[in-house]
Amino acid sequence: MFDMDGLMVDTERLYVRANQVIAGRYGKTVTAAIITKMVGRSTIASLEIFASELGIAVEASELARQRSLVMLDLMNDDLVAMPGLDELLNYLRPRYRLALATGSPSTLMMHIVRQLALEPFFDVLQSSDDIPLGKPDPAIYLRTSERLGVRPEQCIVLEDSASGVKAGRAAGCHVIAVPSEHTRLHDLSDAHVCVADLHAAQAYIMERTPIAAALG
């Protein structure tokens, strides 16, 4: 099971820009420390942190609506897949069932999937829309493994953040951490292995296949 933001696509830098835009609307400035706290959380959880830290008296759902519109504009101009993603997906697709499990809302998930032509690779696309608890709660990975039709312990999870790693591990999956520049300081010790990039993740999987009956 693949996380999306920061793992498959280089969107974290776009979220930084979008958060700055939203903060500016309320006369605030968002810091790197706040961004670090937000990374890897569900949309609502991350924006609750955002509002609390900045002292913005606005519902997280309204901030999410505003940020989604900003993100869609940014992604139209500057959406980039992480290095090694195409090679990894093309290696895995004939061998495993694949799923995407993201804390982002379906509007952003589907925009990314369609813009980068990723839909044919995945058997399951799971957004945060109908998941009551965000990462590090394991709910999204439990739901996704159920939709794949396999047990969590048969799944490999690829994640870039501490909360995502914790979610995958709590679900009972084999977790590969692939930190981005925004999560390199996260505590990823709960992962079974931490690798430098998606090329290294592919090498790890190739060396150990079959780790599990499914990869999602």
Image (tube, grey):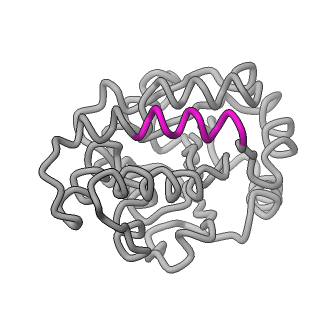
Residue drawn where x is 16% and y is 41% of the image: 59
User: Measured along the vertical axis of the image, is residue 201 above or below residue 62?
Assistant: below
Q: Position of residue 148 (x, y in %)?
A: 52, 24
In the picture, measured across the screen, residue 53 lies left or right of residue 144, that is: left
Q: Which secondary structure is most common in the magenta stretch?
A: helix
Quarter of the image with the N terminus in it: top right
The question of residue 142 being in magenta is answered with no
**Image side of residue 1 versus residue 164, left or right:** right
- Total of numbered circles in the picture? 0
Q: Position of residue 216 (x, y in %)?
A: 59, 37
Give the residue drawn at x 44%, y 52%. 21
Q: Residue at x 44, y 35 (%)?
A: 68
x and y percentages locating residue 158 in the rendered image: 59, 52
Magenta span of residues:
67-77
> Which residue is found at the position 35% from the left and 68% from the top?
29
Instruction: Using the image, determine if residue 129 lies above or below residue 21.
Output: above
Q: Nearer the viewer, residue 28 or 130?
A: 28
